Amino acid sequence: MLIIGIAGGTGCGKTTVVNTILNELPEGEVGIISQDSYYKDTSHLNFDERVQINFDHPRSIDFELLMEHLTILKTGKPIDQPVYSFVKHNRTGDTIKTYPRKVMIVEGILILSHPEIRDLFDIKIFVHADSDERLIRRLKRDINERGRNIDEVLNRYQTTLKPMHQQFIEPMKEYADIIIPNNKYNTVAVDIVRTIINEKL
Ligand SMILES: Nc1ncnc2c1ncn2[C@@H]1O[C@H](COP(=O)(O)OP(=O)(O)O)[C@@H](O)[C@H]1O
Ligand SMILES: Nc1ccn([C@@H]2O[C@H](COP(=O)(O)O)[C@@H](O)[C@H]2O)c(=O)n1
């Protein structure tokens, strides 16, 4: 199994890059694990308490479960990937049966910040977009798709997202094998990654 880790700040285009890579590959050959599925279960908190969580700090992620799941997939067994709701700020209670594939892509803002998980990746990719570009994309996406308003997004950006990005995400570029510049759609880089994957299939 080839495991590819794709990191980068919020709005840099990780999900879009992954979907573009998958578009022209045979269906079912590549598996996806999203770090967002591994936000910790916060059922013990009420909604107002959940809103206060710093979702850009590594402690918000259940890395133990992610590590356990990746280890199980490497042994050839399926896992039950939790489903996360950005609207409820919590897991939904549902899971998606995720089967091991020849190539597994793990994507998320903080996946390169955890040394043991980082070591599991055969290829480490960092997607870069400038912070103003990422903020514009984040504003549009969170308002259109994640039920947020402009004040919420900007307040989270200033109080937690920006400092956490500088502390935990940007320094991870150092560990990347490939850095994809993604201020504009980067079809060349996506084609290169797809070629690497195709060789493995
Ligand atoms: N290269 C790009 N140029 C312009 N918009 C982009 C680009 N890549 C992604 N987007 C848009 O930005 C938003 C965030 O992209 P997404 O892939 O969800 O980022 P991430 O998964 O890194 O948070 C989406 O609305 C997406 O359509
Ligand atoms: N309940 C939550 C959980 C996370 N976030 C934000 O999501 C971002 C990570 O996801 P991307 O798809 O953008 O990589 C992260 O920056 C968190 O602030 C949230 O808004 N609500």
Image (cartoon, rainbow, N blue to C red):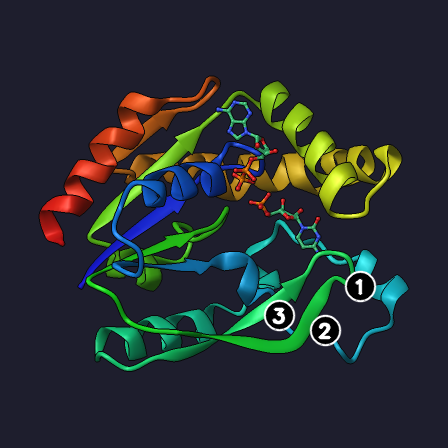
Q: CA distance from mark 1 to mark 3?
A: 11 Å
Q: Position of residue 47 (x, y in %)?
A: 86, 66
Q: Identity of the amino acid at label 3?
A: Lys
Q: Are marks 3 and 2 in contact (CB under 8 Å)?
A: yes
Q: Secondary structure at mark 1?
A: helix
Q: Identity of the amino acid at label 1?
A: Arg
Crowd around label 2: few <14 · some 14–19 · many ≥20 (10 Å): some
Q: Secondary structure at mark 3?
A: loop
Q: Position of residue 116 (x, y in %)?
A: 32, 64
Give the labeled residue for mark 1.
Answer: 50
Farthest residue toward the left? Answer: 199
Q: CA distance from mark 3 to mark 2?
A: 6 Å
Give the labeled residue for mark 3.
Answer: 40
Quick check: is the Cβ at mark 1 less than 8 Å away from ligand 2? yes
Which quarter of the rendered image does ligand 1 occupy?
A: top right
Q: Is residue 166 above or below residue 136?
A: below
Horizontally, is 145 left or right of 117 in the view? right
Quick check: is the Cβ at mark 3 less than 8 Å away from ligand 2? no
Q: Position of residue 135 (x, y in %)?
A: 66, 27
Res 171 quadrant in image: top left
Crowd around label 3: few <14 · some 14–19 · many ≥20 (10 Å): some
Quarter that holds the C terminus: bottom left
- Residue at 55%, 76% (x, y): give it: 95
Q: Are marks 2 and 1 in contact (CB under 8 Å)?
A: yes
